[in-house]
Image (spheres, helix red, strand yellow):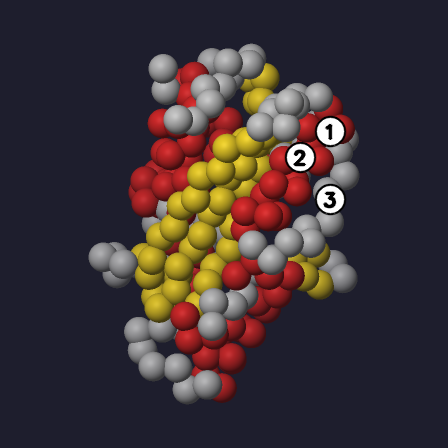
Amino acid sequence: MSRKFTDKTLLIATHNAGKLDEMRNLLAPFGVSVVGAAEMKLSEPEETESTFTGNARIKAVAAVKATGLPALSDDSGIEVDALGGAPGVYTADWAETPNGRDFMMAMTKTHDQLEAVNAAHPRTARFCSTLVLAWPDGHDEVFEGTVSGSLVWPVRGALGHGYDPMFMPDGHDITFAEMDFAAKNTISHRANAFAKLVKGCFER
């Protein structure tokens, strides 16, 4: 039985404005006031774990300790079957440059590696999202969501972010970056994890 969330304010442990807006909209029906890590001037903790759950927990716990507020964090990435699950928890690392993240570079690297191993088509992959909701008393709840699909090349679409232009979800003939926000939000890995979070902690 998941613990119900009864506080008035929830800190979202992210500096990503898009992710913050997404979560604010999803939590709006429950009358929860949402604040972001940037508003609270929090630094980003180092993610040293090798799992999505481990890294999401690091972010949530650091935010709780810094503010005394309950905190929700998300760690997500893409796992490519022909690359043994890479980039996985290192998805953002593959996009790091001295001038910020470049996901076109990361997608090109992924495509080049698939070509190098002569991966068969369809090149199956899944997006994974893990949410950790942590309270000041040390309790936390973990919710995982995934969406399966395949990778396309060349990339398609200008919407979304990250690997969205390369990822075509199962049962669809367009990529996440060709889908409007509302359509993607009904099937995405984060929406999947969020539905579990809402059912577990927010629905009365």
- Helix, strand, or loop for circle 3? loop
Q: Which residue is the extreme one toward the left?
A: 171
Q: Amino acid at mark 3?
A: Pro
Residue 57: which quarter of the image?
Answer: top right
Image spot of residue 185 (x, y percent)? 37, 40
The residue depicted at 49 percent of the width and 44 percent of the height is: 130
The residue depicted at 58 percent of the width and 37 percent of the height is: 73
C-beta proximity under 8 Å, tags 2 and 1: yes
Position above or below: 79 against 186: below
Q: Residues within 10 Å of mark 2 (few under 14, many from 20)?
A: many
In this view of the protein, which residue sits in the foreground, 54 or 76?
A: 54
Position above or below: 37 against 53: above
Q: Could you say which disc has been placed on residue 65 in the image?
A: 1
- Helix, strand, or loop for circle 1? helix
Residue 170: which quarter of the image?
Answer: bottom left
The residue depicted at 65 percent of the width and 57 percent of the height is: 101
For the C terminus, give its image quadrant. top left
- Helix, strand, or loop for circle 2? helix
Front: mark 3 or 1: 1
In terms of sequence position, does the residue under pointer 3 or pointer 2 come before the other? 3
| Residue indicated by mark 2 | 61
Front: mark 3 or 2: 2
Can residue 18 be seen here? The reply is no
| Residue indicated by mark 3 | 45
Q: Residues within 10 Å of mark 1 (few under 14, many from 20)?
A: some
Q: CA distance from mark 2 to mark 1?
A: 6 Å
Q: Is residue 48 left or right of residue 146?
A: right
Q: Residues within 10 Å of mark 3 (few under 14, many from 20)?
A: few
Can residue 197 be seen here? The reply is yes
C-beta proximity under 8 Å, tags 3 and 2: no
